[in-house]
Image (spheres, rainbow, N blue to C red):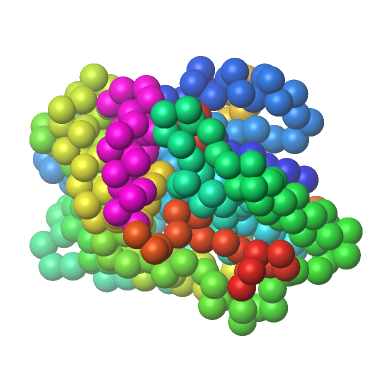
Amino acid sequence: MVVAVAEDSRGTEQARQWIEQAKTAYWCLIDADHCVADLYGMVNVPQAVWIDEAGRVVRPAETAGSTDHFRRMDLATRTMAPEDQAARLAARTAYLGAVKDWVLTGRHALATDDARRKQPRITTEIAQAHAHFRLGTWLRAHGKPEEADRHLAEASRLHPDSWNMWRQAADLDAVGKAGGPEFWARVKALGDRPYYPPPDLPGFGR
Amino acid sequence: MVIVLGQSGEHAVAPAEGLWLTAADAQRVTGWTPKPEGMCCDDSCVPLPAGATRPGHVDVAAFWQFLGNPVLHDDAGETWVLGVGAEARNTQLAGLEAPDFTLPDLDGVPHTLSALRGRKVFLTTWASW
């Protein structure tokens, strides 16, 4: 079963067009508070968690098929080199193949110790950031944008690795800002660090 | 009226001051029940910190922070967040049981993750932004 969660503080109406176009048979849920990111320690989208029949996490939060090839995109034309497009598609196909393989055979499920080791480590700052983020999105939805933005900014300061928090706050400020010049400056500032850390799965070059 | 954003959703409460709540409201927003021995949840009880209780009321903010959890409120003190602290979160993640949640679909119909027990679940996230 697929459960696709929209981390969208603008709520249902913002997510509707994508969900309706996808015409899915699985659950498409709206998570305006980003509670799933909080519960599972996610920092970006798309990230996925694999859960077995007993309700146990067998692969903690990790990048779900996306790659960093977009970082080499020509920003004027918004296009990627053909080889980057091909590599990107190959990674997505490999990831989807691994998911199907797990569903059919159980392969790629991590042993208990490995799954535990790969769980994100939540710091006091991260826990505090989630509280600020929750208050910020609530204040945004209740007509207090200036006060909201203080809390959203504090959330990103406390948890700078969370692209979800930074991009959601940018989007609440203005649609499109999450992918604007400030976003690209932040991506560039990563330097050698990945935007989408590759999962530890076959075909991901680790 | 004050809104408390807790782990079980939004609650409207009427504190005496700050986040001093009646036993019933404290139970509703925290899941912990005030008893003579302290605040109790399932089989465990935690003594309330000094000064966090008086007849009929509990200082929920003080109790929640005492547990190691974040507590925030807006400038007006009208909206409070009772968060989950790092230790509680890490303990839960290390246990590997998938944390449960209930979220609405496009039609507002709530769905609960744990209802899918017995099936493998590919839990994935996306966003419009």
Q: Quadrant of residue B62?
A: bottom left
**Left or right: residue A53 compared with residue A78:** right
For residue B38, which quarter of the picture?
A: bottom left
Closer-to-camera residue (B119/A166): A166
Task: Answer left or right for A2 relative to A47.
Answer: right
Q: Quadrant of residue B5?
A: top left
Q: Quadrant of the N terminus of chain A?
A: top right
Is residue A39 a member of the stretch shown in magenta? Answer: no
- Residue in the foreground of this view, choosing between B14 and A180: A180
Picture coordinates of residue A133, whole percent (x, y):
30, 43
Please report the bounds of the magenta region as a residue range. A166-190
Q: Magenta: predominant secondary structure element?
A: helix
> Along the line of sight, which residue is nearer the eye, A82 or B45?
A82
Q: Is residue A184 magenta?
A: yes
Residue A152 shows up from this direction:
yes
Q: Name above or below for residue A92 compared with residue A15.
A: below
Q: Position of residue A10 (x, y in %)?
A: 42, 25
Give the residue at the far right of this rendering.
Answer: A104
Q: Name the side, left or right, on which A5 lies relative to A76.
A: right
Query: What residue is drawn where x is 34% and y is 41%?
Result: A184
Q: Quadrant of the C terminus of chain A?
A: bottom right
Q: Residue at x 46, y 72 (%)?
A: B91
